Image (cartoon, rainbow, N blue to C red):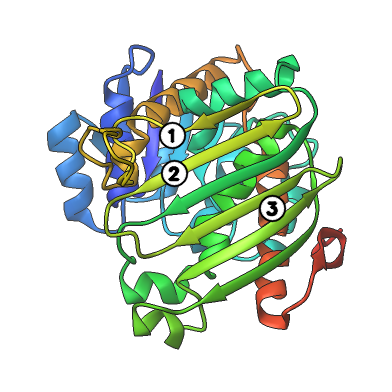
């Protein structure tokens, strides 16, 4: 099949490399406002270059991958749907939840599949954790812990436009908690602080946060996030039930140092970047998209899924600013 890529920044170029190595993909066609980025992709992956999204959609593509700036996501999703071309779009659906809801309304009832990029759903550890929950081997759940710690903050310009740590970073934890447990979040309480980069505080954001999520069956989920984790990129999850407990991310590249005597775990070089931690997951995610394009599977992460994680992020943001518990229904828009 022929896949189009809109946007060739860091993640777009990474997707181009991944797609070029998939057996199902015969050719790529790319576009980016920066001609040099498109030219580099063409030279590296043998892609065809066009000068606009319209030209890309007219170039005989079977599916498109939207990796452009967030502001462009709604228009590009809708353009793909109007052209009848399956769409993969990196999260978020839109810069604001209101815009995301409008996208959902515009595509509802259309027979064009849309997959939103939440790559943890394709990581083997999280897949196995979900299977353990769904099989019943853990028994009734009582506690979930989910962690995402970045080794260093992104640039100030990125922070200023990110929508905040809950919408940019924690949202991955929120999505994977929903996916692994199969439950919905009903209420949140969030706290945050600024212990590092001044530009994060100046942007009105926190650099380190904690959130307590109450799930609809009474399970408690604890989410921990930070922009400052010098030892590396740390993504983990614990799921505790009345019969057993499992963990995701307890492997030799875990960026944590044990101070117990005689303990050598973890023994590997710590993960230092999300692309390192989730290389295989990204490949599995885009492989899934080729199956969506081929019509052999439904979207594994819909716009509705992405918006649910977004409501949790909005509730946590409000809770942080107002120092109180917030229900999801309080922030949800019809």
- 84 or 90: nearer the viewer: 90
| Whole-percent x, y for residue 312 in the image | 71, 57
Residue 124 placed where, x, y %?
A: 47, 22
- Please report contact status of discs 1 and 2: CB closer than 8 Å, yes or no: yes
For residue 166, which quarter of the picture? bottom right
The residue to which callout 3 is attached is 103
- 311 left or right of 281? right
Q: Residue at x 42, y 32 (%)?
A: 250
| Left or right relative to 46: residue 296 | right
Element assignment for label 2? strand
Specify the label residue 249 is tagged with: 1
Where residue 46 sits, quadrant-wise, is top left
Q: Nearer the viewer, residue 58 or 185?
A: 185
Q: Residue 235, labelled with which disc?
A: 2
Element under disc 1? loop
Q: CA distance from mark 2 to mark 3?
A: 30 Å
Number of residues whose C-alpha sits closer than 10 Å to that of mark 1, classed few (under 14), some (14–19) or many (20 or more): some
Relative side of 142 to 24, left or right: right
Q: Earlier in the sequence, mark 3 or mark 1?
A: 3
């Amino acid at each position: 099949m022929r896949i189009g890529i809109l946007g060739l920044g860091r993640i777009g170029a990474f997707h181009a490399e991944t797609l070029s190595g998939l057996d199902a993909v015969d050719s790529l066609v790319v576009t980016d406002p920066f001609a040099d980025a498109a030219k580099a992709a063409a030279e590296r992956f043998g892609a065809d270059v066009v000068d606009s999204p319209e030209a890309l959609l007219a170039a005989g593509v079977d599916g498109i991958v939207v990796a452009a700036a967030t502001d462009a996501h709604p228009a590009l999703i809708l353009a793909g749907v109007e052209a009848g071309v399956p769409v993969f779009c990196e999260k978020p659906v839109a810069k604001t939840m209101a815009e995301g809801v409008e996208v959902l309304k515009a595509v509802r009832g259309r027979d064009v599949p849309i997959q939103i990029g939440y790559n943890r759903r394709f990581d083997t550890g999280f897949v196995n954790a979900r299977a353990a929950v769904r099989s019943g081997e853990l028994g009734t759940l009582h506690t979930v812990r989910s962690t995402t710690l970045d080794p260093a903050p992104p640039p100030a310009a990125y922070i200023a436009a990110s929508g905040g740590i809950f919408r940019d970073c924690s949202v991955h934890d929120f999505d994977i908690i929903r996916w692994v447990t199969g439950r919905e979040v009903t209420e949140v309480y969030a706290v945050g602080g600024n212990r590092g980069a001044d530009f994060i505080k100046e942007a009105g954001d926190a650099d380190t946060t904690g959130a307590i999520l109450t799930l609809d069956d009474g399970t408690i989920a604890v989410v921990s996030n930070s922009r400052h984790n010098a030892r590396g990129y740390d993504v983990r999850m614990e799921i505790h039930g009345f019969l057993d407990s499992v963990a995701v991310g307890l492997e030799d590249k875990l960026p944590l140092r044990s101070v117990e005597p005689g303990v050598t775990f973890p023994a590997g070089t710590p993960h230092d970047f999300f692309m390192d931690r989730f290389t295989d997951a990204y490949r599995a995610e885009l492989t899934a998209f080729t199956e969506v394009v081929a019509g052999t599977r439904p979207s594994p992460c819909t716009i509705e899924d992405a918006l649910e994680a977004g409501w949790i992020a909005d509730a946590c943001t409000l809770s942080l600013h107002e120092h109180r518990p917030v229900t999801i229904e309080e922030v949800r828009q019809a």
